[in-house]
Amino acid sequence: MRSAFPRSSRAALPGLLLALALGACSEEPAPEAPPPPPSAKKPAAAAAAGAADGGTDAPAPYVYGYMPVGKRDPFRSPVEEFRAAGDTGSNECREPLCGWDVDQLVLVATVTSDANPFGMLEDPSGKGHVVYKNFPVGKLQGKVTQVLRDCIAVTEQMPSPDGRRIPVVRQLCVKADRGSGTDLDLGSGKVVGP
């Protein structure tokens, strides 16, 4: 059978393999791969960043920053925060009557027949609110201190020039209805006049 390679080529083949093997064992470093070609389209943000830092195309690494201002501590219990807020003596009133001055409120009625008397105050918008002893009233940290037959007493804490608070008692009384001069006795059905 005849070979595809001539005889002279077959004799040179072992020498060629030896040369290749010795060339691969040299101590020269292998050539590096060529860098990828620059893309034709660059994002505008990457181009602006590259121009700002001297023309490098590498994007800046993202740096995470946490701003804890105005945020609660995630490792503290909300129950403890609530208790701590109550212990500080917070004077903030959350009742609707604390949004009005005591002079703007009108006493509509009182009920004093039982052990816990109460009254009804009407705010300037016409809404009625039931109040009882120690109920917060007014913008100046006032409290209902007495509920009498026709009046209630509200004690407010007025600020003094030296920074102390001075208790001031204000009386709110039921205004007499002067529109009708006659009253009807429901038992007898007779008109009772003044």
Image (spheres, rainbow, N blue to C red):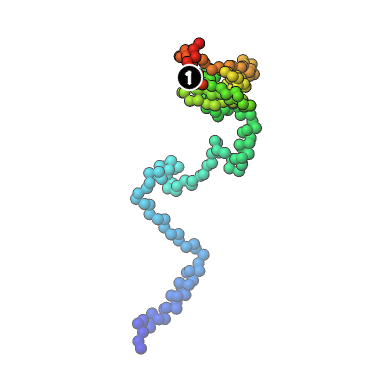
Q: Which of 68 and 45 is in front in this view?
A: 68
Helix, strand or loop status at disc 1: loop
- Residue furthest to the front in view is 188
Q: Is residue 84 left or right of residue 188?
A: right
Q: Is residue 40 left or right of residue 88?
A: left
| Residue 112 visible, this angle | yes
| Residue 139 visible, this angle | no
Residue 78 screen position, x and y as percent: 60, 40
Q: Could you tell me which quadrant the N terminus lies in?
A: bottom left
Residue 79 figure quarter: top right
Residue 7 screen position, x and y as percent: 38, 83
Residue beneath the point at 41% across and 58% down: 34
Residue beneath the point at 51% across and 44% down: 64
Q: Nearer the viewer, residue 140 or 152?
A: 152
Residue 49 figure quarter: top left
Figure check: 90 above or below 164? below
What kind of residue is marked 1? Gly
- Residue furthest to the bottom in view is 1
Residue beneath the point at 49% across and 46% down: 62
Q: Which of 21 and 137 is in front in this view?
A: 137
Residue 181 screen position, x and y as percent: 47, 12
Figure check: 170 above or below 42? above
Q: Which of 141 and 32 is in front in this view?
A: 141
Q: In this view, does 12 lie to the left or right of 120?
A: left
Residue on which disc 1 sits: 189
For mark 1, does the 10 Å Cα neighbourhood hold few (<14), some (14 to 19), or many (20 or more) residues? few
